[in-house]
Amino acid sequence: MGIATNAEANGLRGLFPALANKTYFNYGGQGPLPTPSLEAITRSWRTIQELGPFTNAVWPFIEQETARVRSALAALCGIGPHRISLTENVTSGCVLPLWGLPWEAGDELLISDCEHPGVVAACHELARREGLSLSTLPVLELCQSTPQAQLETAVLEQLERQLNPQTRLVVLSHLLWNTGSVMPIAAVAERLKQHSKQPWLLVDAAQSMGSLPVEEAARAADIYAFTGHKWCCGPEGLGGVALSERLLEQAQPTLIGWRSLRNESAAGSSWHRDGRRFEVATSCVPLMSGLSTSLELLAAEGDAASRLETIRQRSEQLWQGLQRNRAIRTLLPEAPPAGLVSYVLNGQNSAAVVERLGQAGLWIRRLDAPDCLRACTHITTTAAEIEALLAAL
């Protein structure tokens, strides 16, 4: 169902083959890959084979592409490249540094009730192995009842109620994957500095990287983990994590490979002192070429703030349209601060709704916690697409 205007089709949107024959609202699950990025991946494979996959001639090219993507991600996070670890996905970006921290039995992990199950499961297993305790930071109800302008105060008040002398880690996403609310990461980090144990702050940035400005949050967090295959529209299998200076001082490698070592040829070598300490072994270099190209394409459309404005215009259009349908209840009391729009279609089986819409060429997602439907708007989303989804609903 291609309903973009000619002008839109000839711009960035026209570079996405996945958008030519469907109406796509699943950027929060996986963003489509633009043709120039796919071509960059192919060229990178070809270059490596022409130079020889394990020859002296290939190493400068591999270093060039690795440094290119590391520098681009560091610039988005507003930090030096030494604080970036390249990972395969958000989960590895969270787990590898998290499990390398110096834990003591009795330490408490404070986890928000809006975190992705993958991160929650990793924390539960860490707690089991290290003799840690778990507690919950309730933010779901706050998001559903509090306007974004008042949400920072409400979240900080809730944090104050949940902190205790044993709290050693707080887990809180930047852009919540279920409600679509933006969390006050920098303010939370500032509060944690005043705590007697100065708890570490782990931030799942799966939904924020590529969809909104992240510099302030990435600089404030100890672990700010993201992927390239969602809002950045890069290939799956490549992401990164921004690490704080204190984490680099305190944490040891979790999985150990030659990329963790300052001298990869010596088994007794010490670790890298920078973010490479949490990189393990061989990664797919062509994916780095593809992600770098996708980031450059997005940057050509404007900075993160201007892109967010476009994203919000589209999400507000969708949110406003949903208010006109009496059978629908949106999770947020006002238009979303970014591109995630979650809602409940009363009296309908949400899984069946997703299936029926997909048969009509409109793709959204069902979430379990809470049970709702989610549609994502990006800078490539058109007003006509949103009206098509509203009509179908």
Image (cartoon, grey):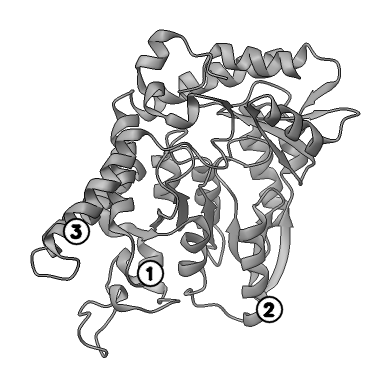
Q: With 63 as the anchor, is 380 left or right in this view?
A: right
Amino acid beneath label 1 = Phe
Q: Residue 201: x and y, percent?
A: 52, 57
Secondary element under disc 2, as helix, strand or loop, is helix
Question: Can residue 221 be seen?
Answer: no
Residue 378 shows in the view:
yes
Residue at the (51%, 21%) spot, across then down: 381
Instruction: Classify 36 as above or below 334.
Output: below
Q: Earlier in the sequence, mark 1 or mark 2?
A: 2
Residue 20 coordinates in the image, percent (x, y): 48, 24
Other-residue count near label 3 (Cα within 10 Å), few / some / many at <14 / 14–19 / ≥20: some
Q: Earlier in the sequence, mark 2 or mark 3?
A: 3
Q: Which mark is residue 128?
A: 2
| Residue name at image x 43 percent, y 55 percent | 237
Tell me which residue sits at (38%, 9%) in the image: 7
391 lies left or right of 312: right
Would you place residue 12 above or below residue 110 in this image?
A: above
Label 2 neighbourhood size at 10 Å, few (<14), some (14-19), many (20+)? few
Inter-mark Cα distance, 1 to 2? 22 Å
- Viewer-closest of 103 and 372: 372
Tell me the CA gap for discs 3 and 1. Answer: 25 Å
Disc 1 target residue: 278
Kindly identify which residue carries mark 3: 48
Counting from the top left corner in percent of width and height, residue 51 is at: 12, 60
Element assignment for label 3: helix
Which badge, 3 or 1, comes first in the chain's sequence? 3
* Residue reaching furthest to the right: 347
| Label 1: element kind | helix
| Quarter of the picture holding the C terminus | top right
Outermost residue, left side: 57
